[in-house]
Amino acid sequence: MEVAAAPARALVFGASGYIGSNLVPFLVRAGVPVRAAARSFEVLAARGWDKVELVQADALQPQTLRTAVAGIDTAYYLVHSMAAGNAFTRLDLEAAANFAAAAADAGVRRIVYLGGLLPEDASGAHLASRRETGEVLRRGPVPVTELRAGIIIGPGSAAFEVMRDLTLNLPVMITPRWVRAKSPPIALDNLLEYLLKVPQFEETAGAILDAAGPDYLSYTDMMRLVADAAGKPRPRIIPVPLLTPGLSSYWLGLTTAVPVDIARALIGGLRHDFPADDSALRRLVPQRLLGVREAIEAAFAAERRHAVAARWTEGAFALRGYRHDTAFYAKRAGGTALAAAPPEALWDQLIRIGGRNRYYYMNWLWTLRELVDWLVGGAGFSRGRRDPDDLRLGDVVDYWTVIGINPPRHLTLYFGMRAPGAGALEFELKPEGAGRTRITVNAYWHPRGVWGLLYWYSLVPAHLFLFRGWTRVIARRAEAAASA
């Protein structure tokens, strides 16, 4: 068995996604020089990766790919467009063709593509897109190694988070038939080890390899194991034949925090069992594969190890109250407004919210929420702040804590009232030329159980107008101050 030299430099293309965000530090720990690429440079920079070259690139804009692939030995292609709605299939194929051409021009030695397991009777746009993306990449002259994995067990994996949310949110659930579909889930660390090692073998050039764990079981069985690992009662699961994949995706949108477009793409293929033949991969890269129970426990342990977070990030364990039963993904609401003023003028208004200044807009609604919190023993009426005109990291503003601040661009506040979940507000100020600035506020809510979901939905009527009005008021105050 011939083994190639370790890659001189690896490109993780799609580094801001779930697998990419985990693969980059894994490769670095293994001593591989890494270049990370994604459409948003800011998202990459927020990861705080040491010894990683960051590049902004978009596979749908071919001119941005030259810098990303220059001098690269192994390119990990981890791009998908599940969140793009019905257009994701077309976008996936266009992106793959652009990337294959750019990799060929740059002399890349190997492309490693992570696809999904494909049963013989596979149907559904998501499964078809994964298969066709691999085919498009292989049409280019650069050898492609395609790993096909099923459900990945790890914090942040969409399929795993769907199961976690369902299990911990609903003690009794009426489910579609897909919960009986079987597959061989693979632990995140096992998959990362495969991704690290497969491009080192010449015989994997052009190969399609199944990546699977040792267990073959249904979603029902997996959800029960999630409940066991979380120390919660097993849910009562009642399958019914009435929920179509489309209806199921909307049902998941109501009962979980996983984005609806991603849930819809996942569910499209869940009518099938997903058998795998991973004997070739096991022979090439021997390792101890975790069973599903072990993999779930490892996912929870990984969350605990990454408990310290400097800012609000999706799924950060510390900012979910150190609780496995608080949803990884967040429900979201927000608003935006355009101000005829520079960012500094809006920042001056933004950093003065709270305390005696209150919140500029619908203060009666804030007071009502504070009263409810006070009645249940919370900090609702604990108003005040260190300085009325200045903010710094760690400051407490009424019942908010400053957990992220980057003047005059970003401000992140952690929610401190009593509620069944964890939340934050993020403000962003973005210059739009000619002395204009767009202010955007987003509320993130990570529900804990069914009460966390009901709490979020009870606030939807207020969210419909609160954030849009709030940003408009801040914009107008900044304009008035700038022109004074």
Image (cartoon, grey):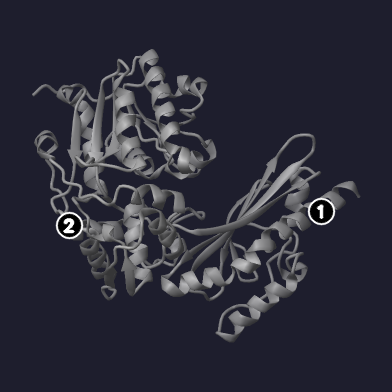
Considering the numbered disc 1 on the image, is that residue within a helix, a strand or a loop? Answer: helix
Where is mark 1, residue-wise?
Answer: 476
Q: Nearer the viewer, mark 1 or mark 2?
A: 2
Give the amino acid type for the residue marked by disc 2 in the picture.
Answer: Leu
Q: What is the residue that sits farthest to the right in this orientation?
A: 484
Q: Position of residue 311 (x, y in %)?
A: 51, 54
Give 56 or 391, whichever is nearer the viewer: 56
Crowd class of label 2 (few under 14; some 14 to 19; many from 20; radius 10 Å): some
Give 434 or 233, whichever is nearer the viewer: 233
Instruction: Say if residue 355 shows up in the picture.
Output: yes
Q: Where is residue 307 in the image (x, y as percent from the top left)?
A: 39, 59
Q: Where is residue 219 in the image (x, y as percent from the top left)?
A: 24, 59
Left or right position of 106 against 444 = left
Q: Which residue is drawn at 46% across and 28% down?
A: 59
Crowd class of label 1 (few under 14; some 14 to 19; many from 20; radius 10 Å): some
Left or right position of 424 against 131 = right
Q: How many marks?
A: 2
Left or right position of 408 against 185 = right
Question: Which picture quadrant has residue 295?
Answer: bottom left
Query: Which callout, 1 or 2, points at the residue further toward the start of the chain?
Result: 2
Give the amino acid type for the residue marked by disc 1 in the picture.
Answer: Arg
Above/below status of 483 relative to 164 = above
Q: Label 1 vs label 2: CA separation?
A: 57 Å
Classify the position of the N terminus by image quarter: top left
Where is mark 2, residue-wise?
Answer: 217
Considering the numbered disc 2 on the image, is that residue within a helix, a strand or a loop? Answer: strand
Give 429 or 164, whichever is nearer the viewer: 164
